Amino acid sequence: FYSYFKDVDGISIRLIDRVTIPPTSAPTTLEYYMSSVHSLNSIEGASSGKRNSTPSRNIYLAAALGIAVLWCMLTVVSLSHVRKARNKMMNESILRAKRNDDKMARHGQDGSLTHEDG
């Protein structure tokens, strides 16, 4: 079983020197409780010190958010320009179609003048 996972995943065995104390059904003493609280506080203090010691992560996060916001703004601006240009092209094609329809109405299908014009 071990050799299968070692071959597949490359996982090896690591020996642990000691194990944690198993829980007991007897109540603990106040001294033991205070020492465990003190050790937890010291662990939390050490971990919070690590978080505050790396302000470069905040700079990278701010830079990434700034780039993302700039990207979104430029996308909105470019889409509005594309929409305006598309509307302008549509309006021009509608005007051209109306002009062609008016010319066709004034002249017959064969190019001769109709009774209204002549």
Image (cartoon, rainbow, N blue to C red):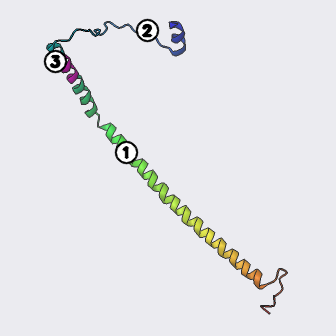
| Badge 2 element | loop
Question: Mark number for residue 83?
Answer: none
Q: Earlier in the sequence, mark 3 or mark 1?
A: 3
Q: Is residue 117 left or right of residue 61?
A: right
Distance of label 3 from label 1 (alpha carbons): 44 Å
Q: Earlier in the sequence, mark 2 or mark 3?
A: 2
Q: Secondary structure at mark 1?
A: helix
- In what quadrant of the picture does the C terminus appear? bottom right
Which residue type does callout 1 highlight?
Answer: Ala
* Residue 40 included in the magenta stretch of the image: yes
Determine whether label 3 and label 1 are within 8 Å by CB.
no
Magenta part mainly helix, strand or loop?
helix
Closer to the eye: label 2 or 1 = 2
Picture residue at 20% right of the left edge, 11% below the top: 27
- In the picture of the structure, the residue carrying the numbered disc 1 is 63
Q: Residue furthest bottom?
A: 118
The residue mark sitting in front, 2 or 3, is 3
Position in image of residue 102 (x %, y %): 72, 81
1 up-or-down from 42: above or below: above
Where is residue 62? Give x, y as percent.
Answer: 35, 44
Please tell me which residue is depicted at 28% across the width and 32% down the height of the picture: 51
Q: Nearer the viewer, residue 5 or 59?
A: 5
Q: Nearer the viewer, residue 106 or 88?
A: 106
Magenta part of the chain: 34-42
Callout 2–callout 3 Cβ contact below 8 Å = no
Circle 2 residue: 13
Residue 76 placement, left or right of 36: right
Q: Which residue is mark 3?
A: 34
Kindly identify the amino acid type of the residue bearing the numbered disc 2.
Ile
Name the residue: 51% across, 16% down.
9
